[in-house]
Image: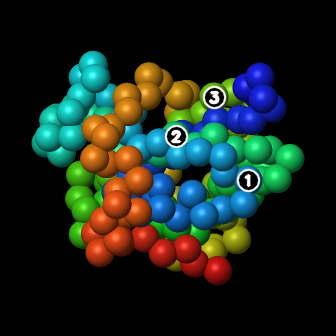
């Protein structure tokens, strides 16, 4: 928990533009920042990440108010805005940089994420098994400025995410 009582979550669900655009509209989300995490290259560029050779995922760093939205409710949104059963792919975007991943900042977050996945798999909400990775949060590298708030700056830009009921 941060000094102001907020918490962080680091989520990858395909192209970070659409993920950020949806998350920013959710009550209790204080801020979002797109970037890269989980790879081997230090401070990678978008062009490097796009090659798939850095092992980074496109992610969104979310600061949220847990008294307004719980971590579990945030996970519910995360799983409703993408297909967590496709390995290294979301819609037309293919590659490890588009993988479904939850990077956790605490043991409690890790336990919550794993339990959430287990319940979803048992409920058969998805026809196929969930392939979302749950890993400890690595270094987060902020994406280039032009990627931040991309769909606000470019309302006709590429948006492949929707929030399912």
Q: Is residue 164 visible?
A: yes
Counting residues from the N terminus, which is met first, the one under dot 3 or under dot 1? 1
Numbered badge on residue 61: 2
Locate residue 47, reporting x and y percent.
Answer: 14, 40
Eyeballing the image, is 79 above or below 91? Answer: above
Could you classify mark 3 by the number of other residues whose Cα lies within 10 Å: few (under 14), some (14-19), or many (20 or more)? some
Image position of 4 (left or right of 145): right
SS type, badge 1 = loop
Per the image, the residue denoted by label 3 is 105
Q: Which residue is mark 1?
A: 28
Taking the view exactly as shown, the residue that stands out farthest to the front is 153
Image quadrant assignment for residue 7: top right
152 vs 17, nearest the viewer: 152
Q: Secondary structure at mark 2?
A: strand
Q: Does the rendering let one see residue 131?
A: no
Res. 121 mark: none
> Disc count in the image?
3
At x 30% / y 65%, what residue is drawn? 154
Q: Nearer the viewer, mark 3 or mark 2?
A: 2
Q: Earlier in the sequence, mark 3 or mark 2?
A: 2
Question: Do callouts 3 and 1 mark residues in contact (Cβ within 8 Å)?
Answer: no
In percent of width and height, residue 85 lies at 45, 63
Neighbor class of circle 2 (other Cα within 10 Å; few <14, some 14-19, many 20+) is: many
x then y, percent, for residue 48: 16, 35
- Measuring from the top left, give residue 145's x and y in whole percent: 31, 40
Distance from the alpha carbon under mark 2 to that under mark 1 = 14 Å
**Image quadrant in which you'd find residue 109:** top right
């Amino acid at each position: 928990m941060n000094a102001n009582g907020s918490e962080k979550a680091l989520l990858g669900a395909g192209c970070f533009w659409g993920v950020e655009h949806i998350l920013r509209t959710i009550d209790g989300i204080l801020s979002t920042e797109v970037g890269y995490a989980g790879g081997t290259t230090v401070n990678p560029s978008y062009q490097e990440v796009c090659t798939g050779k850095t092992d980074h995922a496109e992610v969104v760093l979310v600061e949220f108010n847990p008294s307004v939205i719980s971590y579990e409710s945030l996970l519910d949104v995360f799983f409703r805005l993408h297909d967590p059963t496709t390995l290294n792919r979301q819609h037309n975007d293919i590659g490890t940089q588009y993988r479904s991943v939850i990077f956790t900042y605490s043991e409690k977050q890790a336990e919550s994420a794993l339990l959430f996945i287990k319940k979803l798999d048992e409920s058969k909400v998805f026809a196929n098994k969930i392939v979302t990775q749950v890993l400890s949060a690595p270094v987060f590298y902020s994406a280039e400025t032009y990627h931040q708030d991309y769909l606000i700056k470019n309302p006709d830009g590429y948006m492949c995410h929707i929030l399912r009921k």
